[in-house]
Image (cartoon, rainbow, N blue to C red):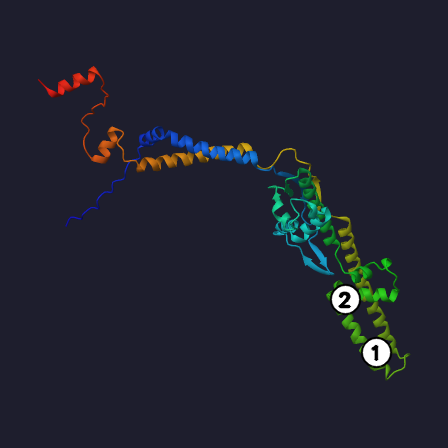
Amino acid sequence: MAVEQPAAVDVPDIDLTHYLHVLSRRRWIILGALAVVVASAAAYVVTARPEYQATTMILIEKEKRANTYNEGTMVETAADDYYQTQYRLIKSRATLKKVYDKLDLSQTEDFGAGPGTLQGAVTITPIRTSRLVNISAQSHDPALAARVANAVAEVFVDENIESKLFISKEIMRALFPETAPKGPAETALGYESLPAVVNSALVQNLRGNYADLETKWGEMSRRYTPEHPELIRLKSQMESLKARIEGETRRVVEGMKAELSGRMLGNNVRIIDTAEVPTAPFKPRKARTLSVAALLGLLGGYLLALGVDALDRTIHTQEDIEKRLGLAFLGSVPKAELTGDSADIYHKLLSGP
C-alpha cells in the first residue's frame, strides 16, 4: 500500500529587491523619523545638566594570615567570598553614613535628601585579573564628586584598620597590663580567663590534673602532718604541675600578643590613586547619545516604512499587479495630459471617420 507523502509547505522567498523598493519609495518617512529622533536626542544633550564622575583606585590584598583571633578564639578566614564581602562593605549603609557625616553632605544639593542618596551615586568596579578596585562617585559638582570618591576610600581604609584592632577591653588589659594599672595577681587571673587559654586542651588537661592533686592533698592532710613524706611528694608534684600550667599559659598569651601586634602594624587595604576633579562631564555622552539616536531613528523609520507600505493597497509596479491580482502583465498605457490641438486630434481619432 502506498504511503501518502505529506504535502510540501511553500516557504516564501525573501525578496531583497522588495525591501530596497520600500526603502526608495518611503525614504521620506525614514528620513522624517531619523530627523525627529536625532532632534529629540540633540535637545536632550543640549538641555541636560552635566554630571561628573571621579574615581579613586584602592588595592585590597588577601589576608596574609591563615587564621585570625576573634576574642581569643582561632577562626578560619574564608578566601572565596572575601572580595565580594569587601565590595559590599564599601557600599554598606554604615560606611556611606560615615562619609555623609564626614563631608557634611546634608548641605549639598545632590545629597541633601539623606545618606541614601550616596547609594546611587557611588559605584564599585573591580579591575579584572587584579586586586585593584575603582571607587567612583557621580555628582553635578565635579569637585564634590572627587571629594566623595576620596572620602569613601578613606573611610573604608580606616574601618578596615579598626576591624583588625577590634578586641574587648578586658582582653587588651590582660594581654598588655602595662596599659592599665594592675597588680601581678590580677594579671595572672586575667591570663587564665582569656578565651584562648580557656580553650587550650593542654592547659585544661593540666588544670584537671592539678585539681585532682589538690583533692588528694586535702584528704591526706587530714590524716598526716605536713612533714609526712607522702605529702611532701604530693606538694612537689603540685608545684611542678603549676609551673607547667603557667608556662603553657604564657606560651598561648605570647602567641596572642604576636598576632595582635601584627594586626596593629599591617593593613591589607590602601589607596593607590586619589580621585582628581574631572574636567569633562560623564553624562550626557553627546557623541554616543547622538549615534545611538541616529541608529534608532533609521531602524524605527524603516520599520514604520514597512508598516505603511504593507497597508498601502495602491498598485505601483508590474510586480504589484501580478502579486495582488494573480494576472499576467500584458502591457501598460501611459497616462498623458492633452491640451489644445493635441486634444482635438485625439478626439477625432476616437470618433472615427
Q: Relative to residue 330, is residue 166 depicted above or below?
A: below
Q: Residues within 10 Å of mark 1 (few under 14, many from 20)?
A: some
| Frontmost residue, 344 versus 80 | 344
Quadrant containing the C terminus in the rendered view: top left
| Frontmost residue, 159 versus 152 | 152
| Residue 35: percent from left, percent from top | 45, 31
Amino acid found under the numbered disc labelled 2? Val
| Residue 151: percent from left, percent from top | 70, 45
| Frontmost residue, 40 versus 135 | 40
Q: Relative to residue 259, is residue 211 depicted above or below?
A: below
Rendered image: mark on residue 256:
none
Rendered image: mark on residue 203:
2
Which residue is at 84% across, 81% downward?
A: 220
- Give the structural element (helix, strand or loop) at label 1: helix
From the viewer's perspective, tell me whether residue 155 is left or right of residue 125: right
Q: Residues within 10 Å of mark 2 (few under 14, many from 20)?
A: many
Label count reads 2
**Which one is earlier in the sequence, the residue at label 1 or at label 2?**
2
From the viewer's perspective, tell me whether residue 46 is left or right of residue 218: left
Residue underneath mark 1: 217
Q: Residue furthest top?
A: 341
Q: Relative to residue 254, is residue 127 depicted above or below?
A: above
| Frontmost residue, 9 versus 151 | 151
Which residue is at 63% across, 33% downward?
A: 280
- Give the structural element (helix, strand or loop) at label 2: helix
State the CA–CA distance, disc 1 to disc 2: 21 Å
Q: Residue furthest right?
A: 227
| Residue 235: percent from left, percent from top | 86, 74
Q: Relative to residue 45, is residue 2 depicted above or below?
A: below
Does the rendering let one see residue 97? yes
